[in-house]
Amino acid sequence: MRGVGAVMEAGRGPGGPCSCGRLLGTHRARGVELRIRIACAKDRDKLIRFYESLSLESIYTRFFGIVRYFDPYVDSLLRNSRAVVVVAEAPDGRVVGVAEAVGDERGYAESGIAVLEDFRGMGVGTALGEAILRVSRECGFRKLYGYIMPENRAAYRLAMKFGARVVRQYESMYRIEFDLLA
Ligand SMILES: CC(C)(COP(=O)(O)OP(=O)(O)OC[C@H]1O[C@@H](n2cnc3c(N)ncnc32)[C@H](O)[C@@H]1OP(=O)(O)O)[C@@H](O)C(=O)NCCC(=O)NCCS
């Protein structure tokens, strides 16, 4: 069996499932059409701006801590050959939501998702969730997992909509998982 690294390497070529810029769908919210697509290296500044625009509370629920400088995080994400980043982009180029899958050598990928406060409750998280699950499967990951706080009702609801399993419960977080080979 080819490793996930090789599958992703092949899939990153033009027209491949993990190719930069690939359009995965569109979603209408706040009267505009958002493009759901795979991010490219040139999206670096937009991604940093996106994370900087989140409230402290959202940063905390997304990263389980306070992050002040997003440049190193975004750089390491975009340089990682086993990572796929999906963005929801407004017509003016602003990124309003991001979902990520960062894989390891076993083919397991850790996921994180966030939507700007102004665009919540309008299906953007659902569109991104659908896109990251699809791309993760197509790019050869076997599992997608993530961590959420038990009180994070929106994230919990979103995960359950797509059939996630809660595989571990700690006092302050759940580990949820999707089996992509099933
Ligand atoms: C989790 C998050 C991405 C959801 O984004 P969103 O765009 O609001 O999601 P959607 O509009 O697609 O809603 C998804 C589901 O959650 C439900 N939901 C949304 N907000 C909710 C809330 N505040 N309380 C309870 N359920 C909520 C929706 O009703 C929907 O379920 P339904 O389709 O059965 O009605 C967003 O809340 C967020 O960015 N949170 C901060 C970052 C974070 O916590 N990330 C998760 C950990 S990595």
Image (cartoon, grey):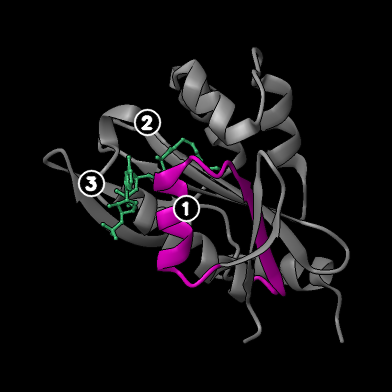
* Residue 148 is inside the magenta segment: yes
Q: Is residue 109 left or right of residue 94?
A: right
> Callout 2: helix, strand or loop?
loop
> Is residue 121 shown above or below 13?
above
Amino acid type of disc 3?
A: Met
Q: In the rendering, at what x and y percent does residue 92 appear?
A: 27, 30
Q: Is residue 181 left or right of residue 80?
A: left
Identify the residue position indicated by label 2 in the image: 116
Q: In the rendering, at what x and y percent does residue 177 appear?
A: 64, 65
Q: Residues within 10 Å of mark 2 (few under 14, many from 20)?
A: some
> Is residue 97 shown above or below 123?
above
Q: Nearer the viewer, residue 32 or 20?
A: 32
Amino acid type of disc 1?
A: Tyr
How far apart marks 2 and 1 lie (CA) works out to: 17 Å
Q: Is mark 1 within 8 Å of ligand 1?
A: yes
First in sequence: mark 3 vs mark 1: 3
- Image mark for residue 156: 1
> Callout 1: helix, strand or loop?
helix
> Callout 3: helix, strand or loop?
loop
Choose mark 2 or mark 1, whichever is in front. Answer: 1
Q: Which residues are magenta?
A: 139-164
Amino acid type of disc 2?
A: Leu
Rendered residue at 60%/75% (across/down): 138
Identify the residue position indicated by label 3 in the image: 122
| Image quarter hosting the N terminus | bottom right
First in sequence: mark 3 vs mark 2: 2
How far apart marks 3 and 1 lie (CA) works out to: 16 Å
Q: In the rendering, at what x and y percent does residue 99 appear?
A: 52, 48
